Image: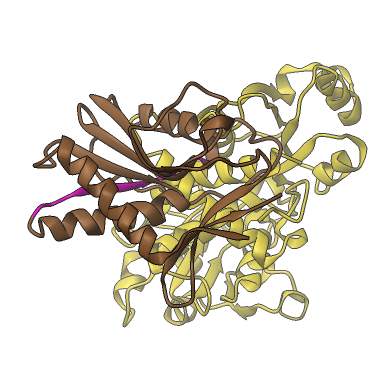
């Protein structure tokens, strides 16, 4: 069985069979990560460049570790410390790097569609590590992996994404993935942070009351307020946001069932989620980070032969 | 397609292989059995069953090994991995590696690479049902052999399970 695609640009472009293949392969890589020697020789003759045009801690480290665990050679590139600041175009930068015989490109960019542009112009396999407000496919895959690991399956699960849906690439990738895998999806948060026609466009439920959303779901994926992408005032203050839309222990204790709490990080404690929720047994936030390496190993491995 | 071993002959070979292992390790102490996915696991399941019948109270350590991430021709075709399950330490143990067919020796070489990432066994032995001896590409020989089978290089030898669960070995000639 093989992936139907040469690149991973977004969950929108891949099939449910592709997603299942990535998740089942990731399960085997998770086993590799428990061994005394947490490394396999699979990508020994593969060179990968990590092209980060936007800040990242978790994703960059996770990809880098995944590449090293697969025995690939890696080059790290961050825009702030490169010739980009001297005016070089994206295509020129990448072509220069590719002339050094690079096989795969992992890319994060603040412009939506930047990895799609690259995929059209260069022969290397491109993996989108987050593009603007479009997609963050490996985050959605690791979220799905973590839900599967904790609850057994994705099909029929009720998942709510709470917070800044408007500016979140994590939300969009999660919606595409969960719908393709047969889960029910709801988005919740302030009306100013939820796109107006999202219900019709993506087939998700919309709820402006976080308590009701939590009562409905099996899993709540809490998202960060993306202040860096907002150029207008969309809510009055962080404190007010926390009071109206923050996930608190009191809210969860009032539910009739136990739900699973997720967060893609970085967390703004006391804003979208309280510390006693983020650090509780309900939370699988750190498992998400751990699973991220296995999922990224699976993506890199499955795309390395094309 | 030619039947090399029918079900009865297959069962006889399982009995013989199990006896050869018992001759060497009568108490099965410090011995660990590892089947190589997928044909090797099918064979190993049978051998473990046979050893267990011989001593029902003995706790036999048996794991399954997948070589997908270690293949030396990995770039030719990316394959989905199989399940890897070694729920015990192999450090200082006597390992009996089990595969259905020994052909070029490349699978066994990859399996040894996998094992060394798990620890340092005292000794590794190889048990195979069919030995296609004349096609070896690596200096690898088996310690327990069901039978040696002369074949053409392009032939395929397969361990198959029929509808009623009976196992046969067939030769698919080129």
Q: Position of residue A232 (x, y in %)?
A: 73, 54
Which residue does the image show at 83% across and 48% down from the upper left? Answer: A113
Quarter holding residue A104: top right
Q: Is residue B66 magenta?
A: yes
- Inspect this view and state whether residue A248 appears: yes
Question: In the rendered image of this protein, which colour is used for chain A?
Answer: yellow
Q: Position of residue A191 (x, y in %)?
A: 66, 72
Which residue does the image show at 22% across and 31% down from the upper left? Answer: B94
Which of the chains is brown?
A: B
Which residue does the image show at 68% across and 69% down from the upper left? Answer: A194
Magenta segment: B58-67
Q: Position of residue A94 (x, y in %)?
A: 84, 26
Q: Is residue A86 left or right of residue B149?
A: right
Compared to residue A228, the image places residue A278 above or below, namely below
Compared to residue A114, the image places residue B50 above or below, namely below
| Number of on-image labels | 0
Q: Is residue A72 magenta?
A: no
Q: Quadrant of the C terminus of chain A?
A: top right
Query: Who is closer to the viewer here, B81 or B95?
Result: B95
Compared to residue A209, the image places residue B5 above or below, namely above
Query: Who is closer to the viewer here, A47 or A263?
Result: A47
Compared to residue A239, the image places residue B113 above or below, namely above
Q: Is residue A46 left or right of residue B35?
A: right
Q: Position of residue A6 (x, y in %)?
A: 78, 46
Q: Quadrant of the N terminus of chain A?
A: bottom right
């Amino acid at each position: 069985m093989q992936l139907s695609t040469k690149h991973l640009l977004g969950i929108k472009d891949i099939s449910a069979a592709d997603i299942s293949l990535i998740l089942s392969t990731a399960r085997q890589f998770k086993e590799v990560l428990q061994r005394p020697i947490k490394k396999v020789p699979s990508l020994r003759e593969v060179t990968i460049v990590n092209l980060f045009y936007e800040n990242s801690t978790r994703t960059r480290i996770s990809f880098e570790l995944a590449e090293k665990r697969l025995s690939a050679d890696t080059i790290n590139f961050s825009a702030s410390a490169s010739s980009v600041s001297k005016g070089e175009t994206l295509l020129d930068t990448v072509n220069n790097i590719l002339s050094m015989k690079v096989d795969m490109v992992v890319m994060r960019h603040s412009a939506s569609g930047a990895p799609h542009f690259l995929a059209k112009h260069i022969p290397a396999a491109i993996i989108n590590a987050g593009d603007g407000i479009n997609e963050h496919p490996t985050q959605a895959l690791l979220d799905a992996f973590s839900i599967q690991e904790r609850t057994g399956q994705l099909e029929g699960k009720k998942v709510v994404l709470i917070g800044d849906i408007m500016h979140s690439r994590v939300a969009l990738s999660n919606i595409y993935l969960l719908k393709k895998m047969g889960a029910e999806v709801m988005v919740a948060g302030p009306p100013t942070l939820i796109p107006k026609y999202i219900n019709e466009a993506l087939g998700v439920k919309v709820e402006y009351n976080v308590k009701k959303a939590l009562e409905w779901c099996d899993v709540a994926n809490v998202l960060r307020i993306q202040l860096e992408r907002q150029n207008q005032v969309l809510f009055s203050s962080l404190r007010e946001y926390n009071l109206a839309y923050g996930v608190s222990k009191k809210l969860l204790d009032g539910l009739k069932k136990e739900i699973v709490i997720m967060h893609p990080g970085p967390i703004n404690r006391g804003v979208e989620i309280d510390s006693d929720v983020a650090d509780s047994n309900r939370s699988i936030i750190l498992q998400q980070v751990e699973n991220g390496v296995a999922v990224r190993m699976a993506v890199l491995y499955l795309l390395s032969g094309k | 397609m030619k039947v090399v071993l029918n079900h009865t002959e297959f069962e006889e070979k399982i009995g013989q292989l199990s006896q050869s292992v018992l001759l060497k390790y009568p108490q099965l102490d410090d011995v660990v059995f590892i089947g190589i996915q997928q044909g090797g696991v099918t064979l190993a399941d049978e051998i473990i069953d046979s050893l267990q019948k011989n001593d029902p109270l003995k706790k036999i350590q048996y794991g399954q090994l997948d070589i997908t991430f270690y293949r030396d021709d990995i770039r030719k075709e990316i394959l989905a991995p199989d399940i890897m399950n070694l729920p015990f330490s192999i450090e200082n143990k006597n390992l009996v590696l089990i595969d259905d067919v020994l052909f070029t020796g490349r699978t066994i070489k990859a399996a040894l690479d996998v094992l060394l990432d798990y620890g340092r066994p005292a000794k590794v032995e190889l048990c195979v049902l069919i030995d296609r001896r004349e096609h070896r590409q690596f200096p690898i020989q088996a310690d327990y052999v069901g039978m040696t089978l002369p074949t053409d290089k392009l032939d395929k030898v397969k361990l198959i399970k029929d509808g009623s669960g009976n196992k046969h070995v067939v030769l698919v000639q080129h």
